[in-house]
Image: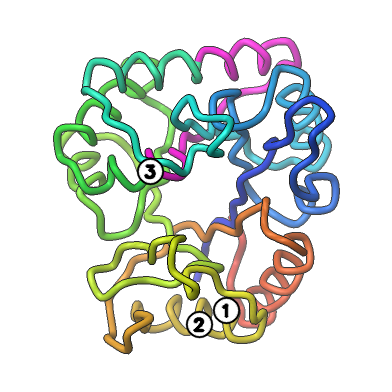
Amino acid sequence: MRVDLNSDVGESYGNFKVGEDASLIPLISSANIACGFHAGDYDIMSETIALCIEHQVKIGAHIGFYDLHGFGRRKQVITEKSLKSLVSYQLGALYGICALQQAKIHHVKLHGALYNQVAESEALSRAYVESVKAFDESLILYVLSGSITEKVCESLNMRYYSEVFYDRNYTAAGTLVSRELSDAMLTDLHFAGQRIISLLKTGELMAHTGEIIKLKADTICIHGDQPNAAEHASFLRTQLIESGVELI
């Protein structure tokens, strides 16, 4: 078994600090760096890229709605044309700062409400995939496992990783439980870790209402903004290695 371990990082803004990036980044294999719309700024992006280079962690663009106040987790109406511009704008920002440090972007992942809205829409998924492909068709898209975006990636011949979440509950439809509900996040390290190991072995996971759903897992996400994110990452990394899983 081989799997990528990713986390959302670079989400601080000026003097406002979010997450434990210095402790978290050495524990993961790929980093999704906020590109300044939902979180992050040019200095934070530069510092986070440097941490990734130091610890040989793959660099990804974490693209969200223009929504600093809501941390990109509020739904917005967006057209396919505007989505293409939004994606290209943020990709260009990260590309420019990467160039200063002779680094390259490895992957792209949407954030928050934008991630979920695109995953449920064929039109938005197509606009998203087309925009990234036009920018650099060698990039890998990290997309919700079982989503419409996977099918669009396949139809447009764009490489993708099916993503599952270590610290989020799932609905019976295979989508993430809304953060408005009390059981959206998982905080029990042992339960969350055992659930992921079981998923990698069986391809199955239990929804929050008890149904069994099937998911493919190429990459596992740990949210970098949650409390004790580094502790969660350390625990999961150990569990994976001890279970014979190779981190890629």
Assess whether residue 95 is covered by the magenta stretch.
yes
Total numbered circles:
3
* Magenta-drawn segment: 92-114
Answer few, some or many: residues within 10 Å of disc 3's Cα (few below 14, many 20 plus, some between 14 and 19).
Answer: many
Asked if the residues shown at circle 3 and circle 1 are in contact, with their CB atoms under 8 angstroms apart, the answer is: no
Answer few, some or many: residues within 10 Å of disc 1's Cα (few below 14, many 20 plus, some between 14 and 19).
Answer: many
Callout 2 amino acid: Arg
Q: Quadrant of residue 65?
A: top left
Q: Which of 208 and 142 is in front in this view?
A: 208
Q: Which of 12 and 179 is in front in this view?
A: 179
Q: How many angstroms separate mark 3 from mark 2 (CA)?
A: 23 Å
Element class at badge 3:
helix
- Please indicate whether residue 234 sits to the left or right of residue 247 in the image: right
Q: How many angstroms separate mark 1 from mark 2 (CA)?
A: 5 Å
> Residue at 25% of width from left, 54% of height from top?
147
Asked if the residues shown at circle 1 and circle 2 are in contact, with their CB atoms under 8 angstroms apart, the answer is: yes
Q: How many angstroms separate mark 3 from mark 1 (CA)?
A: 22 Å
Assess whether residue 36 is covered by the magenta stretch.
no
> Residue at 36% of width from left, 44% of height from top?
160
- Indicate whether 106 appears above or below 172: above
Residue at image mark 2? 195
Callout 1 amino acid: Ala
The x, y position of residue 235, in whole percent, is: 73, 74
**Image depth: mark 3 or mark 2 in front:** 3
Residue at image mark 1? 192
- Please indicate whether residue 82 sits to the left or right of residue 123 in the image: right
The x, y position of residue 94, in whole percent, is: 59, 19
Residue at image mark 3? 115
The x, y position of residue 7, in whole percent, is: 62, 50
Could you tell me which quadrant the C terminus lies in?
bottom right
